[in-house]
Image: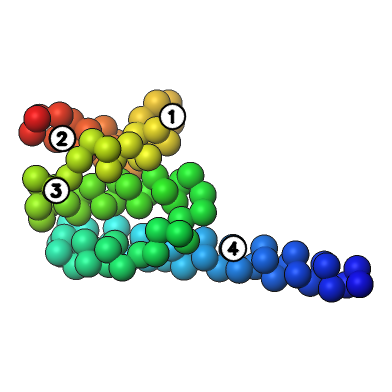
Amino acid sequence: MNVYIWLLAFSDRMSRHGADRGAREALERVDAVLDEMPDSALAIIKGIDTTRLNTERLKADYSLLRTMALLKTDPSSATVEGLKPAYEYYGDSGEPSRQAMLTHFAKGMLADSI
């Protein structure tokens, strides 16, 4: 009986890890094509199952990359609300990073369009 419970817990953990890895890989593909092919980036991001975003960082990265893709392809569809997870995660982190810089850039672009 204990082995069954252990296997159940292990398989649950591995499936969550798999979802995390699959979502991370999709977001990395989006990031790789965002500058050169923003339409392709947007298509990829629209295909991501958001239920697979099981960490705050994945939610923030999805939010940031989706907003950036929208700013490049259809700026009127990008919203401050859509950027909110990224801003909550990276906005006041105090750690300099590419994601933090892009989050502030996107927020400025959205504020400028209001």
Q: Does residue 105 appear anywhere in the picture?
A: no
**Disc 1, SS:** loop
Lower sequence index among marks 3 and 2? 3
Furthest toward the front, the residue is: 1
Q: Which residue is mark 4?
A: 16
Which label sits in the foreground, 1 or 2?
2
Separation (CA) of disc 3 from disc 2? 10 Å
Which quadrant is home to the N terminus? Answer: bottom right
Query: Which residue appears at 27% of the width and 38% of the height?
Result: 81
User: On the rendered structure, is 92 left or right of 111?
Assistant: right
Residue receiving disc 1? 93
Number of labels in the image equals 4
Q: Residues within 10 Å of mark 1 (few under 14, many from 20)?
A: few
Q: Position of residue 6 (x, y in %)?
A: 82, 67
Mark whose residue sits in front, 4 or 1: 4
* Kind of residue at disc 2: Leu
The kind of residue on which mark 3 rests is Ser
Q: Nearer the viewer, residue 63 or 1?
A: 1
Q: Residue furthest right?
A: 1
Which mark is first along the chain, 3 or 1?
A: 3
Residue 16 in view here: yes
Q: Which residue is mark 2?
A: 110
